[in-house]
Image (cartoon, rainbow, N blue to C red):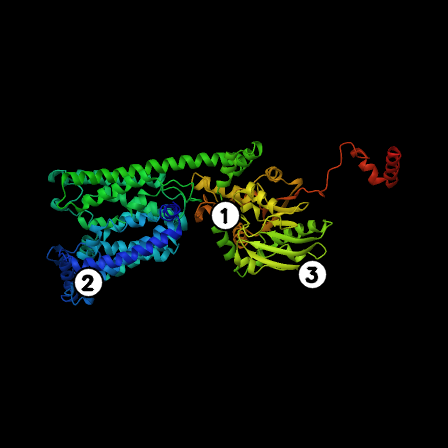
Amino acid sequence: MSLWSDFVHLFFTVNGKGLAITGFLLFIAETVITYGIIQKVPYTEIDWSTYMQQVECFVKKHELNYSKIEGDTGPIVYPGGHLIAYRMFYTLTNKGKDLRLGQYIFMFLYLVNLLSVFRLYWKSNKMPPFVLCLLTLTGYRIHSIFVLRMFNDPVAMMLFYIALNFLISQHWLLGALFYSAAFSIKMNIFLYTPALGCLLLLNKGIWWTIVYGAAAGVLQFYVGLPFLLHDPWSYIKRSFDIGRVFFFKWTVNWRFLSEDFFLNQYFHLTLLVTMLVLWLVFGFAMWFRTGVADTMFAMFTCNLIGIACARSLHYQFYSWYYHQLPFLLFFNYPAPADTKANFNVPWISIIWKVLVLLCVEWCWNTYPSTNASSLVLHLIHFGILAYLVYTRQMHIKRKNKVISKTLMLRTFVRPILQCRSQTSSSGTTEALLAQMRIFDRELKQKQRDWAVQQPNYVAATSLREEIGWRIADKVFDLTKVNERVLDIGCGTGFIAPHLIKENVRHLVQCDISEEMVKRSNGCLDEGVTVERVACDEETLASFAPASFDLLLSSLSAHWINDLPGWFRRCFSLLKEDCPFIGCMLMEDTLYELRCSLQLAELERLGGVGAHISPFVKANDVGSLLGKAGFELVTLDTDDVQIGFPNMFALLYDLQLMAESNCTYKRSSSIRRDVLLAAEAIYKSMYAKDDVYPATFRIVSWIGWKPGPNSPKPAKRGSQNASLKDISKMVEDPEYQKKLSEEHDKKKK
């Protein structure tokens, strides 16, 4: 059972490790399979010889009139990039005669295409690993299009996927140029233009969009320059002929219509209007809400709408969206599971979606197309669009519902902890809290490892140094010597430099980040020995029970998932009559940044993403300490306000402090226009004299593990002075002496 659960968790949950393993294995398998197809399956001649003849018209005959460049199956109907690409193939394959070499070239293009798609799926952080199998194992027709027929459609799509990889990595110029290169080979790439325009406008603004559009236009002009200089009208008419009429006998999607209706201009106009309306609906209601996955969602749905409303689809057009359909169908796959036990694989959803993809494959492999295959293909296209609309709107409604509750309650941790504090310690409640996973601890470890290696790391540690000194100051108030002390979540050592041998003899520093532990500061007092341990401070599994005289924790506990369980583990590590001193960030920390981002996203997106981690209330900390068994609990709250020159400096410092958000439900990215709007809101609402304040609210605690020598509170009524007399005692020391004498007389 354990093996099966490991397998399910690796391949049926959204996780980078499983995706990398699956992608690597599938890439090796695809290399072998594609090579075998070339060796065993006969080549099918359709358009390759025509492409070569068109190249010869240009190369040998020096024909520059685009209307006269043609081959056996017809005239050239593609932009100049098509001629450039196939001129290279013409040269490499001995004027197109070496078909086997041509197939190997297209095998290479297929593998590059596959790697590009795999990277997109990996960057989306939305896809479980098994979905990659659907990009390869159901691709009978797609292999044929690439290596058995060598159409220009897959060449254009390969360049498009490379362009999209650049775009999601925010290399906008390279993305625009590769997009233009893909468009110069085949005009179907135009179907992505509405989504691309929205992407550039939202991220770069109108002027940069014009610049990138101009760069793409220059490339288009360059590839068509010889023909534009000779006869521009013939080049434009042939390359970008949107009024082209297709043969009914080759249609894959409209076979159930009569030929007269298929050729009717009003039918074509209806399809065009339908496509434009759907683009508008998706553009306003569905596109660009969060990050990389949403960019892909916008691009792929934009293309699917164009395909669904196409006047005719031919068999090679399957490559236009084959690698995109699995992403759209599994876009709403459940979020990453935090434990293996509490993730239920949606088998029914997986099965019907796989059946849909198999039906699509059947439609495209039915030759010649039939009424049934064409009708089923249309039902699937519009069914997928309807499914996306429904699930997207449901997701937005659920998200807005959560957001409204969050804005009222400030954090989703609070009600859980309050419930824990107000309920008896039942097994059900304990199990619920133990299974609760809010923070991605692996990501937090990576953030800390990255931060400590940055050259400016030390400049961002002023808050940690200040709080570390305050924790050490409380240790000075202890009257006993602590032989063995544990610093939980030590970072690079902010408490240790202030400790002295009169209070501490041996200090153990532990942190989840091995890089931080390696670089941690020791004690300046040589009388204190220091031991460094890299372990997860949430589990504390490296330490034996009752092995420490003092526990310390400074600004680390706010990243703990199971706080009740963590406090109990800390309690078990202490010896009797020993204290636990610590502090953590509490609710309303960075409220200026939180409010600014929320208002900016409400204005720009109509919803709010999770960009700042949730924090607990001070009262909850006290309650949890008491429930864990600590006595004489003392809580203290304090605000530390730090000024920054702008909001972006604050964000950079948070990264260097390794305090970036690491919740499982975090938003993966934030748009440029939202950041600029948040900066303006932050400045207008909170900044004074060009200083942007950032408030860190800190709750500190001291709790004692009970024992025979623990400090005991005085009995009720044993006081010898009233609180109302305190002011008199401060002003008149003799008055205090008088009260003491009266108390002694009463005792006698």
Q: Amino acid at mark 3?
A: Gly
Depth check: 155 or 627 in front? 627
Q: Residue 444 location, x and y as percent?
A: 50, 51
Q: Which residue is mark 1?
A: 661
Dots 1, 3 in contact, CB < 8 A: no
Q: Residue 357 location, x and y as percent?
A: 25, 43
Earlier in the chain: of badge 1 and badge 3, it is 3
Q: Which residue is mark 3?
A: 527
Q: Residue 672 location, x and y as percent?
A: 44, 49
**Which disc, if any, is residue 102?**
2
Q: Secondary structure at mark 3?
A: loop
Q: Amino acid at mark 1?
A: Asn
Mark-to-mark CA distance, 3 and 2: 75 Å
User: Is residue 107 in view from this perspective?
Assistant: yes
Disc count in the image? 3
Mark-to-mark CA distance, 1 and 3: 39 Å
Could you classify mark 3 by the number of other residues whose Cα lies within 10 Å: few (under 14), some (14-19), or many (20 or more)? some
